[in-house]
Each structure stands twice: as C-alpha cells, then as structure tokens.
Amino acid sequence: MNYIERNIYVTENRIKSKIDYTRGTNALPIYFHFMDFEIPEGAEAKVFVLKPSKRATYNVCPIIDNTVRVIVKDQTFAEIGKNLLQIAISKEEDTLVTFEQEVEVHRNFTEGDIPESKNEAGWIDGFIKGMEEATERAKEASEKAEQIQQTLEQKLKNGEFTGEKGPQGPPGRDANAVITSLEPGIFALSIEKGHLLLIYNATEEAPPLKIVDGRLKYILEESA
C-alpha cells in the first residue's frame, strides 16, 4: 500500500491517530476518508499545513469517492517537528474546515540538498507583508496623532488660542471671547484655563446642556 490513510470526522473532534512522516519524503500521499460528511459534487478541496516555524503550505487536492487525497510536495513537510494539517472543502459560498490533524515529521539522515522551508503558496507571503505594512501605517498614524495632541496642548498652555478679551459677560462669568449681545435663546461656549464656560442671557433659564458619557449634549426632552 503506497499511501497513508486516515478516517476523518467533522461533526465531532475525535481522538486522532498521529501521522508520522520523514522529511524529504514525497512518495507517500495521505488519503483522508470523510466518514460523517458527504462531499458535494463539484466541491474543491485544499490542504493547509502549518509548520513549526509558522510558515505554511496551501495546495489543491483531488477528491475521489468522498476521499481527499493529499499529494505531498517538497515543502509540505519540510520542517522537523509537529506540523498541523487541516483540509478545507468549499463549494460556492459554503466552506467546511476539518479539525487539526497532527503530523510528526522526523529527521532524515540520508537527506542531501533538501529545499529550505518557506511559504509555498504566494498569497501567504502577500498576506503577511500586507499585515506588516498595515501595522506600520497604524503605528505612524498613532505617532502623528500623539504629536498633534502634544502640540495643541502646548499651544493652549501658551495662550495661543486665546483671543483678545471682549466686553464683560453676565455677572459671575468671565470668558475670553468677544460677545456683544445675547438674544433670547442664544448662548455661547468658551474655554478658559482648561474649563468650559457657558454664557447665556441672565434673564432666561440655562440651556439644557449635560455631560453624558464624557460628551456634551443638548437635551431636547428629558423623560420623567
């Protein structure tokens, strides 16, 4: 029998018999017989192998008689140690992914020029590169935002955002803003020494402003 075979279940994660493989071998395909799932006609099967170094391979596999046949390539088991194998069955929008199958890869004392382990599928390299670039962009954006915040805070401390002092506001209220008059229903907001000041017509009730969850909100109507 020139292949390795295993029964595979997808509705429950049964105890699985570990697969032993020798590095440098590619003459033994692995047949996975699906026992509790009928592979739909026209479906596609792919095998994903995560190596100990976190590199990976991802290859298309033939499906024959409800069995997925994993054709072992040079990169499939290129690293010694515990490799994790999963099979993905997909058809249109439907996808089934099996539980992990452990494959223990052993040393090969006869090996000569064994190819260096790498990511076999090009999309993996692109995915990793894209994640690294996105992380770097997010880091740069965070640093710029922090710099802007520090600059604004420093300018505020230096009084660079404070305009010329205008006429005296209502009794008990002083703000660095130019206010000539307050018509009925009109109010103004100003910042002084880090405090938010509300300026409104002393003959009217204070506008319904409240701090809710750290945000200043104008309450149109409060429930009883």
Image (cartoon, rainbow, N blue to C red):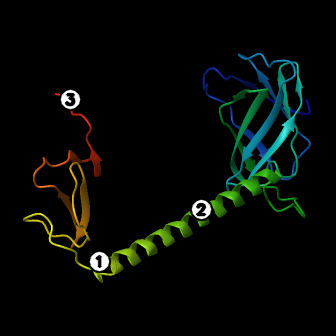
Give the residue number, with chain letter if any, for mark 2. Answer: 135
Q: Residue at x 86, y 53 (%)?
A: 24
| Discs 2, 3 touching: Cβ within 8 Å | no
Q: Residue at x 67, y 23 (%)?
A: 10
Give the residue number, with chain letter if any, for mark 1. Answer: 162
State the residue in front, 45 or 160.
160
Q: Residue at x 72, y 28 (%)?
A: 95
Tell me the amino acid under the disc marked 2.
Thr
Q: Earlier in the sequence, mark 2 or mark 1?
A: 2
Residue 85 percent coordinates (x, y): 72, 40
Q: From the viewer's perspective, is the residue at label 2 or at label 1 nearer?
A: 1
Tell me the amino acid under the disc marked 3.
Ser
Q: From the viewer's perspective, is the residue at label 2 or at label 3 nearer?
A: 3
Crowding at mark 2 (Cα within 10 Å: few <14, some 14-19, many 20+):
few
State the residue in front, 73 or 154.
154
Q: Which quadrant does the N terminus fall into?
A: top right
Residue 79 percent coordinates (x, y): 75, 55
Give the residue number, with chain letter if any, for mark 3. Answer: 223
